[in-house]
Amino acid sequence: MIFIQIIVGWIKRFAYESQQLFFFSLKMLRSMAGRPIYPAETFEQMYLIGVGSLFLIVLTGLSAGQGMTLQFSNELAEFGSKNYLGRIMAIAILRELGPILTGLMVAARVAAGITAEIGAMKSSNQIDALTAFGIDPIRKLAAPRLIGLIVMLPVLTIICDIIAIIGGWIIAVFISHITSTTYITAVKNRLVFGNLFIGIVKPIVFSFIIGFISCYKGFSSEGGTKGVGRATTESVMLSSISILIANFIITKVVYSFFRGYL
Amino acid sequence: MIEFRDVNYAIGDKQILKHVSFRIPAGEPRIIVGHSGSGKSTILRLILGLACPTSGEIIIDGQNICGLEEKRLREIRRQIGMVFQDGALFDSMTVGENVGYYLLEHTEMKLDEIEDNVRQMLGFVGISDEYLDRLPDELSGGMQRRVAIGRALLSTNPKIMLYDEPTTGLDPQMTTNIISLINRLMEHRHVTSIIVTHQIADAFKIGDRFIFIDAGEVAFDGDVNGLRDSKDPRVVEFLGPFRKSIAHVHKIDFV
């Protein structure tokens, strides 16, 4: 009986949180449309998200590209199909690994930062102070961060894709002894509209997920510094899980309806 | 004028305010006293429209602010200056940016004009120019509180000033400075002022009209003599040793 009560309690809390997140997300979208706009804050966020995450993304892309190429080249060698290495790398990175690794890395780094910053402002009454001055705190704090994510996450994903493919090229040419032309030609063959499209749509969706969840968790944090810490952890967890679920849904939808373009 | 009419406020199952009613005429000060956690600060949040009462009406200048749309609320907030507990200064901005923030956001003033206004205001609250480019973290608690008062005054040229525990955590000298600043503002600008505090000794130095809140209820509303003579056990317990000395406390004039 107690077990059922706990489950019901979880479901109720999940439903309530989902509803609150939904309404908060609508407020954020509305705040992006109206005036005043905050260009200085928006560019600052673009810099913090983009430039701040660059090193991490380059390292992730390089590591993933090299590791995958090493694994695939050994397997493909058994079937005498090493020439397909570039083709497989392009598909795996453009469609899946590039967006998802970038999304998860940015979720870990940026979502935590956004939630902690907004949560700290809330616990020290700074958000109430903004409201008292007749300033919409969602427009002032959340909208620039969301715009920063929408602009920079696709850019970071493209950089991750390029670095991963370059990392793969280094392994393919110098360790697996595939000619550079073979690898590059195979990669080029898979740079088709469908693969590029899916590789851009995913980070845009992920940026909304990270922006909505991290800002919501910051604004709804309660309980002082301990509450901010808890909200930050939940923000990263929820963003990461949502990204993984969204990634699967997008892949499934694309395969169901746009297979001819891939 | 500010009027509360049978205001109730709850968060979840917890009742914060119960049937709170009072009236504060325009230009008058009112000190709201009570134990920590009695619901005093909630009254200020309700006046600012940062929270909505569960039931009842909050009338500001003849208009019930409960349920007003955000745009109209923002217009009302522009008549109100709020000094939050601990100042609530924007910690990523300098002292000058904090004080001039409202002018930067809501007016077409040029930067040098804003800076002139900021310098004047900082002078008014007793902060020298050398602190203009400092961050709030680099200031003492009392200085932060004075910057917060300056920010509230410059921001809205308010008709109503709300102070949430303005002297809590300050040393005696700084407390005297803040109280004298509040008294000076009340005398020179004639703004309706509500000061929330649990520091009973400080309360008597600011004004002589009190509302005592106990466990979310108005236990007393009246002048200093009524407070002193009250037989309500909640008031007697709260005043404790200060009860006998009330007659000897005088308002502090700004020096």
Image (cartoon, coloured by chain):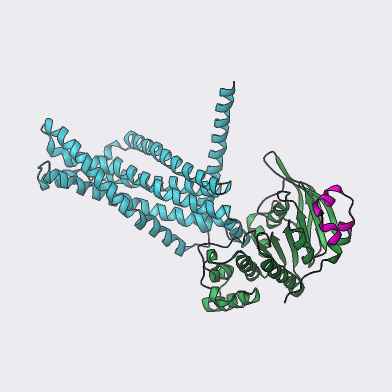
Chain colours: A cyan, B green
Q: Quadrant of residue B251?
A: bottom right
Specify whether residue A61 is in view: yes
Q: Residue A256, how many percent across, how many down?
A: 34, 33
Q: Which of B140/B164 is in front?
A: B140
Q: Residue A163, how many percent across, how many down?
A: 24, 50
Q: Residue A180, how many percent across, how many down?
A: 11, 47
Q: Which of B80/B133 is in front?
A: B133
Q: Which of B158/A39 is in front?
A: B158
In the figure, is residue B142 to the left or right of A77? right
Q: Quadrant of the N terminus of chain A?
A: top right
B244 inside magenta stretch: yes
Give the residue at the far front of this rendering.
Answer: B241
Residue found at x 57% / y 52%: A123
Specify whether residue B61 is in view: no
Residue found at x 11% / y 47%: A181
Q: Quadrant of residue A249?
A: top left
Q: Quadrant of the C terminus of chain A?
A: top left
Q: Residue B55, how many percent across, how many down?
A: 75, 46
How many callouts does the rendering have?
Answer: 0
User: Relative to B112, does residue A54 appear above or below in the rendering?
Assistant: above
User: Relative to A234, does residue B238 appear above or below in the rendering?
Assistant: below
Residue found at x 27% / y 40%: A261
Q: Quadrant of residue A183?
A: top left
In the figure, is residue A200 to the left or right of B140? left
Range drawn in magenta: B226-245
Give the residue at the far top of this rendering.
Answer: A1
Q: Main secondary structure of the magenta part?
A: helix
In the figure, is residue B2 to the left or right of A38? right
B74 inside magenta stretch: no
Residue found at x 78% / y 68%: B27
